[in-house]
Image: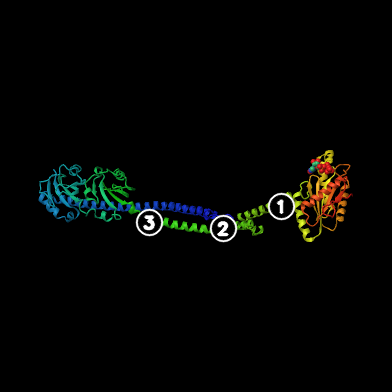
Amino acid sequence: MHSIHPFTTLKARMTVIVGALVFLSGMLLALYAINIVERDMAQLVGDREYALLSSAAAQMEQDLNAKRTVLRVTAEGMQAAGAYDPAAVRNYLQRVPSLGQQFFNTVALDANGVLLTSLAGGAAAGQATVAARAYFRDTVRTRKGVLSPPLRSALSGKPIVLLTEPVFDAAGVLQFVLAASIDLSQPDFFEHLDRLKPGRHGYLFVLTTDGVILHHPEPGRVLRNVADEKGGIVPSTRQALEGKDGWVLAPNKAGVNSLIGYRRLANADWIVGIVYPTAEAFAPLVAMRQRALLRTGIAAVAAGLLGLLAIAILLRPLETLRHQVARIRRGDAGIDIIDLTRRDEIGALSRAIHALTEERAIADAESARLARTDSLTGLCNRRMMESELDMALLRQRRSHAELGVAFLDIDHFKHINDSHGHATGDAVLVEFARRLRQAVRATDIVARYAGDEFVVVFEGLSSAEELAALATKILEAIRVPFPVIAEGLQVTTSIGLTLGRAGSTRESLLKCADEALYAAKAAGRNGFAIDGTVAGACGTGQA
Ligand SMILES: Nc1nc2c(ncn2[C@@H]2O[C@H](COP(=O)(O)OP(=O)(O)OP(=O)(O)O)[C@@H](O)[C@H]2O)c(=O)[nH]1
């Protein structure tokens, strides 16, 4: 039996294929499921951060409104009190404590933009003018309070924004403008923003709709316009400046992939933004992905091992069948050891092997029989006769019984062929064989030796006389006309007989019988001749 390398077995290959398929499909399914979950979770995280941003923006709007309210109420109070001259203005302002709480500084400017008074000092009355500043001109023109763009304070040099409120007299004439500043460098105003900063590296920032930064964790960037910074405006910021609120996943200015959100304030041209690096924002998702993949991998390996076990169990009968076939081939067992009762493919294969083996055995037996049989007459052929004669000689040596050999040749058979045709000649051979077979004992060996020559081996003879009787019986059986032609054909044969003796061999027996046949032919055919019991002499006899 050829041994099979463990790696080339069906079991190994099926295990590898099934294992790989289970592993791959498991991983693909896990990745697919993880992607769906991640997408949903990323949406949740983004929405949550955006909600945070919106609440920060709302808080900022509230703060601005509160500051506006304080300034407007102060302006209305001053109008009601008629506090228009610089001393009265200063006195009034000093009596409003909420101004100090809400603002970095509050100044009053006359209708020409010249400083009337500054609560926090910094410059003397009349020394500074803001006539050229857009926020002042807008306040005078619109006769309403405005929120200035971020600017550097002329008095303190700090980055500030200003809220203004015009104060009119009873006749509606502008008396002065209150301008209250918010210090962008102080943490107070953006304190709540900084408290909301997500994770370790996330941050919130504020910029105007023109792109000027109001608040940023890097103080050096305050008052700069994002358009003027190195690298220009990132696409997400550009969209925000164009009026689009919401969140996206995109690289920030430093190229770090981030969750970036923008929310525009309703009561100021400000945009609150959030940057949250995705590595941090989605860290739990990444951990979840790794855990899920690891567990899926373990599950797939376990499934593969179970598959291996299942395959091993399922294929065990095949292995058994292989060993059974090997044993049958070695001759250690018969075909019956194969189990034919299984109702699966292995059972079908077993039955096929069983049937094939039986058919082969029958075919082998048939071809062996054909190899030993004369195809025309069905008698033993010459080869079989020779081996049977050898066996008979062996038996004779043990039993010491007599053994006789007869050599027969149909007389003038050529003439039969020539006169009646080859087919009739064949029919004569067949009929001759049949009669010969019937004329002797069933245990005697009857063979067609060649052409029209036949040999009979008689075992268990008692004397040469018995041989003569047998020859006579054969001649009589042949003498009856052969029904191979309508009127019947007279066929005769000549027989040479010999009796085996000590030291006889196949060759010597056949030679003696052949010589006796020659003598019978010479004596005129249709008779027989028997060699004498004296060694070397061949006797003749006529029927
Ligand atoms: N029809 C037929 N003829 C065969 C077959 N085998 C041999 N023969 C013929 O048998 C004849 C044998 O003739 P011989 O034995 O030589 O001579 P004979 O005519 O029998 O003459 P004697 O033997 O001297 O009586 C030949 O013509 C062969 O061609 C066969 O299978 N069928």
Q: In the image, is the residue at mark 3 within 8 Å of ligand 1 by its beta carbon?
A: no
* Residue under the image location 61 percent in, 55 percent down: 346
Element under disc 2: helix
**Callout 3, which amino acid?**
Ala
Element under disc 3: helix
The numbered disc on residue 287 is 3
| Quadrant the N terminus occupies | bottom right
Residue 207 percent coordinates (x, y): 25, 47
The numbered disc on residue 314 is 2
Tell me if residue 382 can be seen.
yes
Q: Nearer the viewer, mark 3 or mark 2?
A: 2
Residue 533 percent coordinates (x, y): 84, 55
Comes first in the chain, label 3 or label 2: 3
Give the image's coloring scheme: rainbow
**What residue is disc 1 on?**
365
Which of the two residues, 282 or 97, is positioned nearer the viewer here? 282
Q: CA distance from mark 3 to mark 1?
A: 75 Å
Q: In the image, is the residue at mark 2 within 8 Å of ligand 1 by its beta carbon?
A: no
* Residue under the image location 37 percent in, 56 percent down: 287
Q: Nearer the viewer, mark 2 or mark 1?
A: 1
**Callout 1, which amino acid?**
Ala
Which of the two residues, 161 or 43, is positioned nearer the viewer here? 43
